[in-house]
Amino acid sequence: MTLDVLKSLSLTRITIGVMVLAGLLLFPPLAYFCGAMMILAGLTGFCPLEKLYTWLLGAPASCSLAAAPGAGRAAGQDLQDMSADQIKTAVAEKYSAVARTPGAKFNFPVGRKFAESVGYPADALDALPAAMWDSFTGAGNPQPYVDPRPGETVLDLGCGAGLDLFFYAKAAGNGAKLCGLDLSGAMIEKARSNLEACGIRNVEFLNVSADAIPLSDASVDLVTANGIYNLSPDKDAVMREAHRVLKPGGRTIFAEIVLKSALPEEIRKNISDWFRCIGGALPKAEFVARLTAAGFREVKVLWEGRNARTGHELAVCAVIRAEK
Ligand SMILES: C[S@@+](CC[C@H](N)C(=O)[O-])C[C@H]1O[C@@H](n2cnc3c(N)ncnc32)[C@H](O)[C@@H]1O
């Protein structure tokens, strides 16, 4: 068996099973030790075996007992065996788990510390309900580059729990029309209640996939996003849809993880690497070329910097702007 197959079967699960059996048959204290480890993992999310395997193999081999809700069935699945619809279902389940249990363990950063690390100011976050930032999972911080103008129609693709939408609503004012779109129903519900709690009424939500946006052609001034393309199996369709709904002269400004060069094959194979927005990442030049092929012009990388989201040495976070 290859290392990848072993990893996908979850080494920790196999090891705990073997130790329990060996303990019961040969050396009972081993079975007690395993029991204690399972209780520790269940109560605290800390799994010593997982740490050991991460250290030995250089990548997490998920601890079944400490795994996040929603991690289950799809966690180790090979992308080649999954249809686009299955990938979208798995993504929706995973990000719904982030919305419902943001404090659980995920293989990507979630929440307040991460938001601060990519540049969201602590005092701005302090002024918001915790539910607004506790499930933040953006690719970075597009805020300094996104320029919603008073009265504009703004569509945020993959809006999550609504942190970016909140700032756009404040900048565009009461006369604006905002729309948050997300595949995850739990994220949409959380965003709706977050914005309501902040008194923002001029926002609607769409619980659909961004590759088929139920809005009319040329109806939006600004399409934003913070980490949606790498989770979408059909990036070209998302780009075409963003372009279609924009008014002539409209713009898209978003943050996404892009690559300095192609990734090793093993990082591109597994759904768990897709969840952390790296498995589906494209080299920067290819990303820009695809936006152009979707009809965008003036495609510019406004900022490029540390990739706090996935931490891979070949990946950077980019803020990209393009026009219709
Ligand atoms: C990386 S998270 C970022 C969420 C949010 N923008 C933030 O900054 O916290 C990506 C979000 O996009 C949603 N998503 C992924 N693929 C999608 C798709 N094809 N269509 C719509 N939403 C999608 C996920 O459910 C998730 O909430």
Image (cartoon, grey):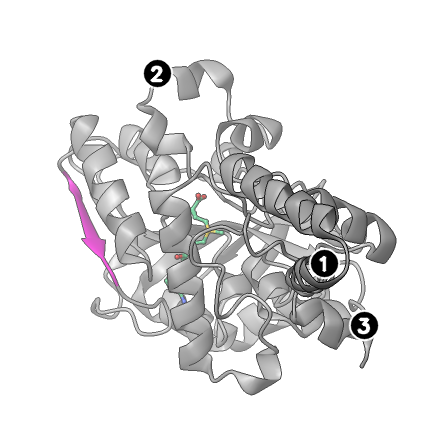
Q: Amino acid at mark 2?
A: Ala
SS majority, magenta: strand
Residue 39 on the magenta segment: no
Q: Which residues are magenta?
A: 202-207
Residue 205 on the magenta segment: yes
User: Viewed as shown, does residue 92 lie left or right of 319?
Assistant: left
| Residue under numbered circle 1 | 19
Q: Amino acid at mark 1?
A: Met
| Residue under numbered circle 3 | 3
Q: Nearer the viewer, residue 39 or 162?
A: 39
Residue 158 shows up from this direction:
no
Judged by depth in the image, the label closer to the viewer, 1 or 2, is: 1
User: Residue placed at 55% from the left, 77% from the top?
Assistant: 293
User: Viewed as shown, does residue 57 lie left or right of 137?
Assistant: right
Which residue in the rendered view is the most extreme toward the right?
56
User: Residue placed at 65% from the left, 71% from the top?
Assistant: 9
